Amino acid sequence: MDVMAATARAAVGYPHVEKTLGVCGGKACIAGTRIRVLDIVGLRRRGFEPEEMLRMYAVPLTLAQVHAALAYYYDHPEEIEASIREGRKLVARIRIDQGRAVRQRRRSR
């Protein structure tokens, strides 16, 4: 593990959650995966129980990892909510851009 990853993980302070530059934009993820805390939060909001989340990813997860992600969210709701809002804004921009591209193609026919 490089020094930056070790520093990032130490700053997070959760054994199963880390932030690594260059991985998922430096967002909080389950350690050793690209599964973001906000992904786990999204599943919880859709009514999935932590035990059900274990079967949702190709990467094997433990219940401790899922609970650590949820604990991180409960301790840092502003950070995760900001990431969720950022993602929604990005999706909205992409949809607008796609709509423009479709309209332009139709006009050029």
Image: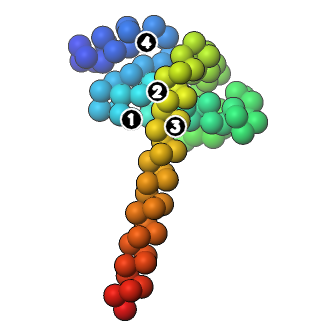
Across and down, in percent, residue 46 comes to 72, 39
Q: So how many labels did they put on this image?
A: 4
Disc 3 crowd, CA 10 A, few/some/many (<14, 14-19, 20+): few
Residue position for label 1: 24
45 sits to left or right of 93 = right
Q: Residue at x 48, y 60 (%)?
A: 95
For the residues bearing labels 2 and 1, Cβ distance under 8 angstroms: yes
Q: Amino acid at mark 3?
A: Arg
Q: Which residue is mark 3?
A: 85
Q: Secondary structure at mark 2?
A: strand
- Nearest-to-viewer mark from 4 and 3: 3
Disc 4 target residue: 12
Q: Disc 1 marks which amino acid?
A: Cys
At label 4, which amino acid type do we have? Val
Residue 60 visible in the picture: no
Residue 104: where, in percent of width, then height?
37, 79
Marks 4 and 3 sit apart, C-alpha to C-alpha, by: 21 Å
Query: Residue 29: which disc?
Result: 2
* Residue 57 lies in quadrant: top right
Number of other residues with Cα within 10 Å of mark 4, as a class: few under 14, some 14 to 19, many 20 or more: some
Residue 7 visible in rendering: yes
Q: Secondary structure at mark 4?
A: helix
